[in-house]
Image: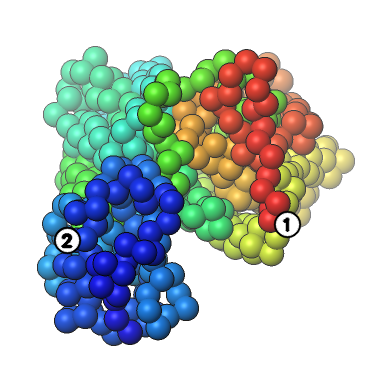
Amino acid sequence: MTFTSSSSLGHLFNSSSASFRSHSVNSKSEILSKKLNNKHKPLLSYYKLTTRNISRRKPCSSFQVVGSNRPLKVNVTSSPPHDESIPNEIVTDSFKDQWRDNMILYSTAANALADLDKVCLSVAVIPLAASLGWNSVTVGWIHSAFFCGFTIMQIPSGILAEKFGGQNTLVVGVCLWSAGTFLAPVCSSVLPIFLVSRVLVGIGEGFAPTSLTDVIARWVPDRDRTSAAAQIFTGQNYGNVLGLLLTPVILTYCGGPAGVFYIFGAIGLLWCVVWRMQWKGSSAPREPVNPREYVVEGEENSPPWGNFLRSKGVWAVIAAHFADNWAKFALTAWLPTYFTKGFGIPLSASSMLALVPPLLGILVAGAAGRMATQQIQAGQNVTQVRRRFMTLALLLPAGCLACACVLHLPALNSRLASLLAIAATIASIGLARFCVASLYCLHADMSHKHSAPLLGITNTAGALAGVISSPVVGFLYSKTGSWSMSLFLPTIVVYLIGAAVFLSFVDARPHNFDAKPGEPIILPLPPSA
């Protein structure tokens, strides 16, 4: 199998290649032909070549190689290859798949690091508070400082991710929160400076959800989006487990609280180096999977906030995100206290029990990602798939919490009822991870281009739920002394309202949020969909 000559290639140009400079095409095709024939000729029998144009974000042309039934796409960029051993023009399907797998793995690690740095403080703050004389109010302010930084950064980080690319804003976020974690021991002696360091960690972690959503939208094909989102956002569970397991060990054997912050901060900074190497490698693609959707010459590139808020589908995701985060933050914050005060379980044992929900969440998220991917690849309607899995994520936990309420009735006061109530509460947290096959995919389903600012909007609602839920539970418990009235029933109500709004308005069809007044926002699906 050989390339045709450069003159023959000219006859194979289609209409979309008219913008190419002919002398560039000829010279580049000759160079490429020599490279392929001399060194990489065996690859031509089964590899596709990627396409890149001289002018970025424009359509590219494909050519038919003589003697082959497979289309060959030729790179005609004028930039030299990064690695002469494998020309930059040759990025095979297998190379792209391997690069994408690595990218998803490192993205999962970033999410794990984000939760690792949150969990490490919740454990390390106990000896730190004892040594510095902090009371519970001060510790509460330290936790709030993180959420303040995290909440205010959601929408700005979405705008930045859309403009500069999630792969670039993510590394900025990891650098910020790792630096804030690394500097914590130095700042801890002066409380206001320590609070600033926690705000810095919150700001850095505020980049993670929007940046990762943008990365998924740009660099993962639609067919693989669900499984990629499930794996990446399950990193939160991995971070929870690792944080709860490693932090006590580091506190004991590696220098106390200072060792915890230094080690976890250094790991984050090392991740930044590895991430940049991933994107600078010779196999890294130079264009997103849908490059023309991101920047259109002559168009206003700022997010269309008005169209976002006029979309019923966006409000459906806001409601689901609020409900999911209300339950997650309320149950996570109060679970150890619930175990200790409700059942007399020692604090050490309750800490071990706290490992069970994230471990269950890892299993549920993995299964949900695989099942949703299979259903979509089998041709099922994407909106129906997203509706199905979000329904499971909202109603199954609500059912578990309802069972816990019943098991707390005085008539059922027994050891078996107590064990079942604990199991139902833990199951509610794990089953909520069905959301990774819906909630964290819908932003990219509706718009590749605006997925990051969309997540910024919905995650702001989710962060506000986290800020509100824990104090509300504390207030209600102080008034009623009942876990059913303070923790379970309010969470069930929020779940049911979120499910009702979501099921009424969710729509995963592509949205044209850049539509002018009078133009439809929801785009028709292609005939094959």
Q: How crowded is mark 2: few (under 14 residues within 10 Å), some or many (20 or more)?
A: some
Residue 44: where, in percent of width, then height?
33, 79
Residue 519: where, in percent of width, then height?
65, 22
Quadrant occupied by the N terminus: bottom left
- Spatial CA span between label 2 and label 1: 46 Å
Is any atom of residue 305 visible in this view?
yes
Q: Quadrant of residue 518?
A: top right
- The structure residue drawn at horizontal position 25% and vertical position 35%, both measured from the top left corner, is 172
Three-letter residue code for mark 1 = Gln
Residue 263: where, in percent of width, then height?
20, 47
Assign a secondary structure to mark 2: helix
- Closer to the camera, 11 or 517? 11
As drawn, 518 above or below 150: above
Q: Which residue is tagged 1? A: 380
Q: Quadrant of residue 202?
A: top left
- Closer to the camera, 294 or 481? 294
Q: Quadrant of residue 367?
A: bottom right
Assign a secondary structure to mark 1: loop
Could you tell whether 401 is left or right of 153 in the image?
right
- The structure residue drawn at horizontal position 32% and vertical position 66%, both measured from the top left corner, is 9
Could you tell whether 508 is left or right of 51 in the image?
right
Three-letter residue code for mark 2 = Ser
- Closer to the camera, 57 or 328? 57
- The structure residue drawn at horizontal position 21% and vertical position 49%, both measured from the top left corner, is 276
Q: Which residue is tagged 2? A: 27
As drawn, 144 above or below 375: above
